[in-house]
Image (tube, rainbow, N blue to C red):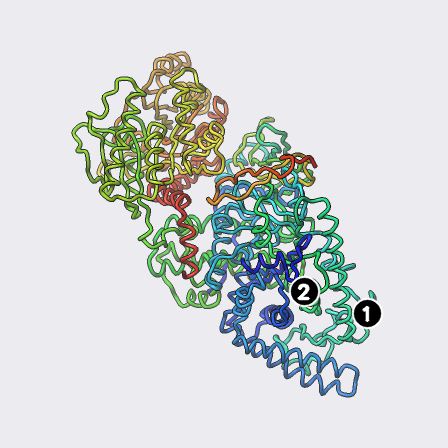
């Protein structure tokens, strides 16, 4: 960034003048990945060849001339991953060289054909330009990114990138799909340029809330939105589009496109490119000369296309065209550069009077506008840069990254969805011409995520198939296809590409499930769609492919929990046991500090986890809070002993407020970050704080919440409660509890079948908030349509007598059975016999019993409350009913009872979901992801990806 | 590799909302034959669109279930929306599927108000520290 800082005070005749404001010129270079080895020549590959010839190479040549002349230009260039991949592809480079050869031959013939006419000098002009491009291409040895890297290293450009295949983020279904687009884009860039990009181009400037956190996770500092995207922010941006804002609490800045400078270049009627002296894009000899004459030089044997030989100027609005005169066009280039600069100078002088800082005018453009569409565009950029340097000192030139270094303090806002497409939102990418694609793309997203969860560490052939499936998904997501379908040009190709990628993805997914064989046809697909050779499909998994990290950086975790088996009071101890075992299986080094347990040693190894227990004599307090304080003091002592014998940890993971004081003391003395799991809150348990003890506990919970760098909650419901009660925003993460599905099945030698009569099952404590009284009322309604219906209520609790009383009042004694407490085997038998599991809770932090039912293919109807809203997706893998609504409970239970096919379908989906989402391995991986957030391993990953 | 035709369905029960503009929200859905059979027997296929969350206003439309998609127009900018698919029986709507919520963007600027500047903290994801403005601290635009 030293070059950026130097621009703040550009030397002018021995003096240093500080500009009053800045221009940030941003060029975004992107083309879809088009590579067709199956054909000798392919029409759409010429998009790339034309852009190279007319835009990318002329742009580099212009920047090199500026550099050579000592003009301290400072430009931002975004290079998309598909473009970077194509620029490095040997096949395309070879074909591009052949393309240039053909054009050179055409140039010779054109000079002959036009000899003696006014067009001859233009033919010679094109011949010279082509020779210049060819010489540059050969000089770079075909490696254009190296030229950009050289310019970056010289401080002339700031290089950034965009999504992996230019996927339009606002219309993606899942966060994982959007994350992978960002992550793979950044990785492609880092592999090419040796470090991650400082900024990120959102494809089509398409922003949707949440994108900023994906960028933050990749170390990105800024992105750019359309003007209204910033102007409609909440709260209102104080400086409009002329200063960046920070989005949410991520520290990622958004810059906005300046409308005026955009209009001067972009507008098809009043923009510079429409000047009558500039070259006419739409008059190309490719459409005008005899076909037999052109055929040897054309990419397709039967389709006319542009050759680049265009002999006319725009001339006027009508069809009449006059011959193109390069000298006139060059003169206009300088006048337009001057006009643009003068407009910025006036704009900045006016803004600087109103603002308390130097304004920045962000002028982003598609790079292909310059050269391809506006032939004289690269020269205009060159002329503008020279005038900026030599002719004035009001306007400085910098990059968004430079500006943030100079002005790090900015307003914080929330942005809404926006884009730079027509209309300003998503109409271009979502309308009746292209809306059909989203059901397919979204299904691919879901299936890719599910495949990743199912095949976590697929070996050889399956891995190849899954990696290719990931490529096909990414390629299908390119914003180019939906854009082309809307504009109506080349729709056949866009539709074909979509169908191919969707179809290949489906076939690859089927192959994975059907034995994972890599046949010749799969190899052919790998050869064709060979983008992202480094991709690991597990990037779609928990932690974004975290498992690719070398084992040497697996975390060392000090876990604090007052419960641990055999000391089991509630669910916490079991949770810590299962989680720490799973973490250890993932390679983490885990040490648990806990309370004493009768008959257990002070130190033991439990499933690879080191467990240290306090001596019983350490806890003598009779008063609850005194006992808790002793527990915390004891844990601090254990930690001190560990440190004294050389143990090293990366973080402290505290479970609930009872170990909060120890977590604080240990973290402080060892300089460690704290992750806290808050399993439940005192406020939530009691519906408020009603006495001094509850208020004390609440205060300690709040202190732990403040201390923790990340807080883990088991459900969105609990996360919302924690955020609301303790005012902690972005640091809360939701990771559900897990279950052991295998332990819920009846032994194979004792098969149990469904009851002959329809049977509902409830399991849980008999307390009012479990809603059994609502279920009994629903039973009364259901019995009208299902006279033989039975209900089994498994569990015990203080509400049991009242429920028995209700059963008698409703006349259900013969239909309802209260089993009392059931052990594991009996629970499994009840689950196997029932037809529908009903859990009509009025309050439920998580809802593990519903998960247990789902795990064994029992269709479920649950209360639409608390953690159950995360567990059951209404109409997909069960039904959710508003708490207390017996009529609706009866309705949905009735639906399942009268439609066994529907019940079976939902149960199957539910069981699959439990297997993939709620198993301990998945939960451990997500927990490791949270650990990575607090210890900064992600940045180490990025460094690793960059080859450092 | 011979490319198969696009499937007409994936065996899912799903309804998805996508924001097209601040005032237009697109919905698409898929219903499995088993669910379709259930809905058909029960009542009139209904698409219920909620603006402003579950406690907000709703409107019902009755498209052909097989059409598979619908554009909700005249939506309010800056609101959370979701949609339910279900059937109406004797005037009562029973939701069968529910979309995830989406939020339409604002299409106007916010009222002017005071603001403060922040600098990004070193730790990723942590809120930036508030910095006082050089003059008054709060600027009324």
Q: Residue A172 carries which label?
A: none
Quarter in which the C terminus of chain A is drawn: bottom left
Q: In this view, does A754 lie to the left or right of A690?
A: left
Residue neighbourhood size for the residue with mark 1, other residues' Cα within 10 Å, grouped as few (<14), some (14–19), many (≥20): some
Q: Nearer the viewer, residue A819 or A929?
A: A929
Question: Quick one: SS at disc 1?
Answer: loop
Q: Nearer the viewer, residue A941 or B8?
A: A941
Q: Nearer the viewer, mark 1 or mark 2?
A: 2
Q: Position of residue A519 (x, y in %)?
A: 39, 65
Q: Nearer the viewer, residue A175 or B63?
A: A175
Q: Residue furthest front?
A: A14
Judging from the image, mark 2 belongs to the subunit labelled A
Q: Where is residue A176 in the image (x, y as percent from the top left)?
A: 47, 48
Q: What is the spatial separation of the Cα atoms under label 1 and label 2, in whole angstroms?
A: 42 Å
Q: Which of A811 and A566 is in front in this view?
A: A566
Residue A466 in view of the camera: no
Residue B117 in view of the camera: yes
Question: With respect to residue A153, does A605 lie above or below?
Answer: above
Question: With respect to residue A214, does A700 lie above or below?
Answer: above
Q: Name the residue under label 2.
A: A13
């Amino acid at each position: 960034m030293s070059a950026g800082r130097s621009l703040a005070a550009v030397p002018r005749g021995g003096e240093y003048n500080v500009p009053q404001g800045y221009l940030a010129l941003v060029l975004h270079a992107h083309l879809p990945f088009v590579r067709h080895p199956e054909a000798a020549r392919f029409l759409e590959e010429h998009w790339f060849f034309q852009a190279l010839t007319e835009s990318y190479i002329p742009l580099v040549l212009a920047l090199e001339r500026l550099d050579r002349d000592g003009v301290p230009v400072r430009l931002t260039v975004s290079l998309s991953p598909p473009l970077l991949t194509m620029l490095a592809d040997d096949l395309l480079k070879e074909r591009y060289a052949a393309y240039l050869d053909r054009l050179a031959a055409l140039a010779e013939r054109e000079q002959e054909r036009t000899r003696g006419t006014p067009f001859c000098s233009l033919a010679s002009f094109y011949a010279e330009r082509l020779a210049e491009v060819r010489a540059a291409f050969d000089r770079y040895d075909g490696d254009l990114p190296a030229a950009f890297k050289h310019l970056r290293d010289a401080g002339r450009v700031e290089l950034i990138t965009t999504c992996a295949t230019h996927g339009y983020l606002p219309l993606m279904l899942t966060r994982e799909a959007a994350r992978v687009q960002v992550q793979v884009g950044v990785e492609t860039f880092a592999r090419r340029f040796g470090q991650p990009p400082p900024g990120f181009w959102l494809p089509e400037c398409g922003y949707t809330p949440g994108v900023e956190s994906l960028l933050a996770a990749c170390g990105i500092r800024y992105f750019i939105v359309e003007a209204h995207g910033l102007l409609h922010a909440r709260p209102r941006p104080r400086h409009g589009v002329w200063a960046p804002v920070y989005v949410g609490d991520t520290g990622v800045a958004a810059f906005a496109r300046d409308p005026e400078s955009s209009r001067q270049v972009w507008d098809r009627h009043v923009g510079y490119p429409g000047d009558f002296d500039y070259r006419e894009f739409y008059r190309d000899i490719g459409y005008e000369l005899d076909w037999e004459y052109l055929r040897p030089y054309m990419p397709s044997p039967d389709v006319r296309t542009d050759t680049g030989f265009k002999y006319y100027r725009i001339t006027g609005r009508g069809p009449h065209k006059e011959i193109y005169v390069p000298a006139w066009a060059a003169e206009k280039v300088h006048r337009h550069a001057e006009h643009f600069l003068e407009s910025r100078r006036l704009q900045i002088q006016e803004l600087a009077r109103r603002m308390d800082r130097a304004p920045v005018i962000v002028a982003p453009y598609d790079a292909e506008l310059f050269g391809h569409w506006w032939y004289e565009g690269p020269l205009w950029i060159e002329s503008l840069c020279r005038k900026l340097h030599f002719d004035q000192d009001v306007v400085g030139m910098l990059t968004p990254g430079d500006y943030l270094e100079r002005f790090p303090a900015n307003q914080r806002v929330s942005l809404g969805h926006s884009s730079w497409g027509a209309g300003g939102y998503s109409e271009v990418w979502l309308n009746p011409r292209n809306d059909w694609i989203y059901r397919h793309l979204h299904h691919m997203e879901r299936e890719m995520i599910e495949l990743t969860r199912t095949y976590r560490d697929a070996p050889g052939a399956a891995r190849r198939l899954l990696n290719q499936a990931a490529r096909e998904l990414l390629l299908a997501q390119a914003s180019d296809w939906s854009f082309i379908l809307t504009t109506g040009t080349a729709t056949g190709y866009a539709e074909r590409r979509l169908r191919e990628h969707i179809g290949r993805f489906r076939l690859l997914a089927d192959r994975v499930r059907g034995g994972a064989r890599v046949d010749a046809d799969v190899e052919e697909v790998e050869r064709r769609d060979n983008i992202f050779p480094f991709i690991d499909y597990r990037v779609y998994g928990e932690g974004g492919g975290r498992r690719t990290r070398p084992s040497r950086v697996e975390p060392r975790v000090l876990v604090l929990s007052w419960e641990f088996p055999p000391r089991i009071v509630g669910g916490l101890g079991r949770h810590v046991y299962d989680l720490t075992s799973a973490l250890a299986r993932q390679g983490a080094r885990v040490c648990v500090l806990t309370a004493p347990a009768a008959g257990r040693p002070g130190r033991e190894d439990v499933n690879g986890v080191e467990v240290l227990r306090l001596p019983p004599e350490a806890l003598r307090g009779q008063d609850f809070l005194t006992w808790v304080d002793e527990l915390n003091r004891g844990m601090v002592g254990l930690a001190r002993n560990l440190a004294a014998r050389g143990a090293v940890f990366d973080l402290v993971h505290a479970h609930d407020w009872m170990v909060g004081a120890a977590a604080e003391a240990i973290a402080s003395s060892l300089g460690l970050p704290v992750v806290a799991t808050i399993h439940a809150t005192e406020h939530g348990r009691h519906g408020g704080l009603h006495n001094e003890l509850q208020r004390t506990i609440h205060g300690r919970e709040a202190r732990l919440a403040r201390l923790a760098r990340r807080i883990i909650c088991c459900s969105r419901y609990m996360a919302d409660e924690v955020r609301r009660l303790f005012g902690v925003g972005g640091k809360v993460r939701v990771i559900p509890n897990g279950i052991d599905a295998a332990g819920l099945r009846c032994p194979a030698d004792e098969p149990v079948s469904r009851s002959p009569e329809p049977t509902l099952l409830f399991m849980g404590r008999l307390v009012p908030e479990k809603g059994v009284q609502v279920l009994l009322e629903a039973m009364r309604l259901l019995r009208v349509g299902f006279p033989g219906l039975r209900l089994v209520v498994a569990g015990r609790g203080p509400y049991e007598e009242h429920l028995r009383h209700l059963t008698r009042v409703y006349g259900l004694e013969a239909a309802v059975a209260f089993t009392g407490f059931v052990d594991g085997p009996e629970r499994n038998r009840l689950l196997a016999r029932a037809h529908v599991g009903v859990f009509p809770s009025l309050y439920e932090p998580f809802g593990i019993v519903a998960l247990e039912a789902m795990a064994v293919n029992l269709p479920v109807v649950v209360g639409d409350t608390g953690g159950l809203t995360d567990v059951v997706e209404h109409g997909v893998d069960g039904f959710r009913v508003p708490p207390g609504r017996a009529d609706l409970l009866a309705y949905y239970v009735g639906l399942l009872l009268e439609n066994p096919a529907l019940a079976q379908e939902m149960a199957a989906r539910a069981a699959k979901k439990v297997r993939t989402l709620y198993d301990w391995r998945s939960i451990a991986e997500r927990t490791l992801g949270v650990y990575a957030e607090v210890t900064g391993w992600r940045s180490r990953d990025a460094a690793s990806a960059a080859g450092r | 590799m011979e490319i198969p035709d696009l499937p007409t369905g994936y065996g899912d029960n799903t309804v998805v909302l996508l924001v097209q503009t601040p005032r237009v929200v697109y919905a698409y859905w898929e219903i499995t034959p088993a669910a379709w059979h259930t809905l058909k027997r029960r009542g009139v296929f209904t698409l219920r669109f909620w603006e402003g969350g579950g406690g907000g206003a709703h409107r019902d439309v009755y498209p052909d279930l097989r059409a598979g998609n619908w554009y909700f127009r005249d939506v309010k900018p800056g609101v959370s929306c979701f949609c339910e698919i279900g059937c109406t029986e004797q005037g009562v709507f029973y939701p069968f599927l529910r979309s995830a919520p989406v939020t339409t963007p604002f299409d106007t600027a916010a009222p002017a108000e005071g603001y403060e500047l922040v600098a990004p903290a070193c730790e990723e994801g942590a809120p930036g520290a508030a910095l006082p403005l050089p003059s008054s601290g709060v600027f009324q635009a």
